[in-house]
Image: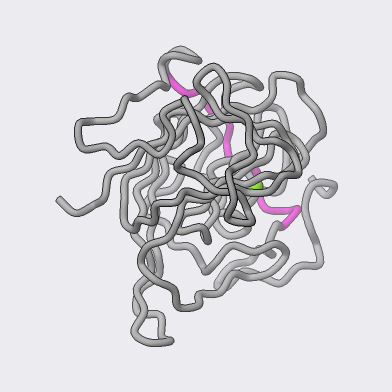
Amino acid sequence: MANVGYTDTPFLPNSPYRVHDAARPQPRIITPGGVPGAACFLPAPSDGIALFDGTDLSGWVGKDGGPAPWKVENGYMEVAPRTGDIRTKVEFGNCQLHLEWATPSEVVGDSQGRGNSGVFLLGLYEIQVLDCFNNPTYADGTAGAIYGQVPPLVNPSRGPGEWQSYDIIWEGPEFNGDQLVQPAKVTVLFNGVVVQHGAHPIGITGHRNVGEYRPHPPVGPLRLQDHGNPMRFRNIWYRPLTG
Ligand code: MG
């Protein structure tokens, strides 16, 4: 795997592995249950708040705060490559988040260059989105990873062009002034399979560095990444964890 990771990045805290370590073992590949496509479509419950209902991007803005420049068609949004990330107008905190995504059916590129996007909680903490079907990459950059920090427990990826789902339970970090009191905690189901179980981000997502926490509000937008690939998303909703 030496060609898909790094050997010169800093070591992760309390870990024998470097950030994006080329030698870190690949998550075990499994086949998710159910039927590709419709089986991963999970309608929102009655108290679910839609962030994207398949019709327009009126709830989103682009990197400059103007209208979100991505494409909407056939009930999904599609990254308009190199127009930048988009984020929700609404800001929210601890939540259950559901979304569905598909990588391009035409396979282009490899490793981090193939079907790359990302789901950023509070706009800061990335759960990696990547075409990881027959596409080795560094373990902490696999789909379902807390990017650059915690690889997924397994790899239940479906193939290019197939709809896949994330169900994310997010608890943000707590700060007292400048001090971190409690790190964030996240559980992720990928195609119905647990890939993160109460995992703690090391800090705000970065590239080739060890993430660090810095104080921020308990709420923020949901941000989706433009990594240059025409990725698709649909059926995005959340529920605040407020009982
Ligand atoms: Mg990404």
The number of discs equals 0
> In x, y percent, where is residue 18?
69, 65
Segment tinted magenta in the rendering: 21-33
Image position of 234 (left or right of 133): left
Residue 127 can be seen in this image? no
Image position of 8 (left or right of 176): right
At 54% from the left edge and 48% from the top edge, which residue is drawn? 61
Q: Residue furthest front?
A: 66
> In x, y percent, where is residue 57?
51, 36
Q: Residue furthest right?
A: 3
At 76% from the left edge and 44% from the top edge, which residue is drawn? 82
212 above or below 179? Answer: above
64 above or below 41? Answer: below
Frontmost residue, 77 versus 115: 77
Q: Main secondary structure of the magenta part?
A: loop
Frontmost residue, 213 versus 138: 213
> In x, y percent, where is residue 123?
51, 57
Residue 19 lies in the magenta-colored region? no
Residue 220 can be seen in this image? yes
At 46% from the left edge and 25% from the top edge, which residue is drawn? 54
Its colouring scheme is one colour
125 above or below 88? Answer: below
Residue 22 lies in the magenta-colored region? yes
> In x, y percent, where is residue 222?
47, 50
At 32% from the left edge and 24% from the top edge, which residue is drawn? 43
Quarter of the rendering containing residue 113? top right
Image quadrant where one finds the N terminus: top right
Image position of 123 (left or right of 194): right
